[in-house]
Amino acid sequence: MAQDAAVTGIPPRAPRNPIDRYFRISQRGSTMPREIRGGLATFFTMAYILVLNPLILGGATDKLGHHLNNAQLVTSTALVAAVMTIIMGVGGNLPLAIAAGLGLNGVVAFQLAPQMTWPQAMGLVVIEGAVICVLVVTGLRQAIMAAIPLPLKQAISVGIGLFVAFIGFVDAGFVTRIKTPDATTPVQLGIDNVLRGWPTIIFCFGVLLTLVLLIRKVRGAILISIVVSTVLAMILNAIVTVPKHGWGLTTPTLPDKIVALPDFGLVGKVDLIGGFASAGAVTAVLFVFTLVLSDFFDAMGTIIGVSNEAGLVDEKGHLPGIGRVLFIDGLAAMAGGAASASSNTCFVESTAGVGEGARTGFSNLVTGVLFALAMFFSPLVGIVPSQAAAPALVVVGFLLMTQVKDIPWTKFEIAIPAFLTIILMPFTYSITNGIGAGFLAYVVLQVAVGKVRRIHWLLWVVAAFFAVYFAIHPIEAWLGVH
């Protein structure tokens, strides 16, 4: 019990009830209302996965040309997110919500499925989760996290801050990709470098409202902004004309039907070994390796970033009880595969809940229950447009960015890896790529300055794996894998 107080620096308070005692709410300097607000904020900032995951998986076909049913995908996505988020809250006691991992679902949809059936692809996802659990049980995953130098952990948090802020700007349409082949820049402001339309106004309003409330230390700043912006968006959508797809994936309007029964048709549709026969053993192993590496370090970066922001790590950057957290994350990957929802992992959007004051796993109960309810209220899933939720990500990005001051920028052998970690997360739209580049640069530069003894042997191993990760396509070509 005293360990939490030492980590957060907050004097312990006597628990007020059994729930407070179990989750250590008072001990971590939080309150029940804060945890509830945090759970709500986290749900609203990541609820988009209920739309996006079915869109990605449902838009792809497997080797036989089969599509996954969209309604069933919504149910599976919400089911696994609800169950695993609650398990993380009860078992890990951290404000870390879980859902289908973006990027991971792209690998499943566009790399695995074309070479096998959907059940076989999801079988490889289950195997990936099992491998991660084995790494946790053997202590390797925790040891790797403990071997990472503190400045690199801080850089991971800062990089995630930029990454989530970039996600917020992109989701809101404030920043867009230039699609013409002769474009001189990859992204632009709005459309043709001009901010247009009411949805953009809602986003700008939401960002400014959140910042004003935050600066004035208003409790519930993020959640208030999301609710107010959503109501305003619904009003505007009813009285003005917004072009088709102007709001993106979610239009802020009340649906004709509010309640619908969930369809569990995809749950359990898994073939654990068929993928090795359909795609070939070498290809299947490489697929599992890619999933493990991406999930492993995406989750690691997210756990570090969220825990740092919540003040739950000690002065050495260690998180108490990390073994349970990592094991649950591995179980989430297995559960995602078993329900055909793709690999599930910790969500970086959990920082929205932390920004709202969440410090314990109790907030996960709120988020998990909302995901469970979403299965029955799937028509209402799309009521919060990205323009109303995205401001929370921008503000949380700022909060995470403040850790940049603690990185020793005058020590180039540390600063350069930290720099690469930070910039490559948003620049490549991948937490894993940023971590990988930072680790590789750290090992190379430590050798260059004659500080080989400072490199933990596990970092050598991890750097070697990342070298393979970045060179996966040349390796596949050399092995004759297509």
Image (cartoon, rainbow, N blue to C red):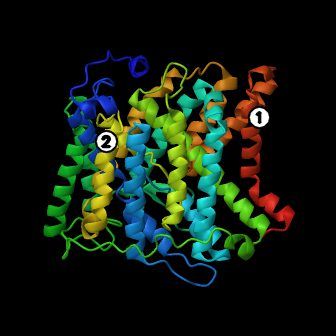
Please give the name of the residue rendered at 56% of the width and 37% of the height, measured from the top-left corner: 422
Q: Is residue 178 left or right of residue 195?
A: right
Residue type highlighted by circle 2 = Ser
Q: Position of residue 199 (x, y in %)?
A: 27, 60
- Amino acid type at circle 1 is Trp
Q: Is residue 174 left or right of residue 222?
A: right
Q: Nearer the viewer, residue 474 or 369?
A: 369
In this rendered view, identify the residue nearer to me: 37 or 241.
Answer: 37
**Occupied quadrant, residue 12:** top left
Report the mark closest to the observer, 2 or 1: 2
User: Is disc 2 placed on a helix, strand or loop?
Assistant: helix
- Position above or below: 174 against 481: above
Coordinates of residue 335 in the picture (x, y in percent):
50, 59
Q: Is residue 481 above or below residue 410?
A: below
Q: Quadrant of the N terminus?
A: top left
Say how many tags the image has.
2
Left-right relation of 238 to 222: left
On the question of residue 136 being in view, the answer is yes
> Which of the 4 quarters of the picture holds residue 36?
top left
Residue bearing the label numbered 2:
363
Please, what secondary structure does the residue beneath circle 1 have? helix
35 shown above or below 52 = above
Q: Quadrant of the C terminus?
A: bottom right
Q: Which residue is mark 1?
A: 460
- Mark number displayed over residue 121: none
- Quadrant in which residue 148 is drawn: top right
Q: CA distance from mark 2 to mark 1?
A: 37 Å
Q: As drawn, which residue projects farthest toward the front?
A: 18
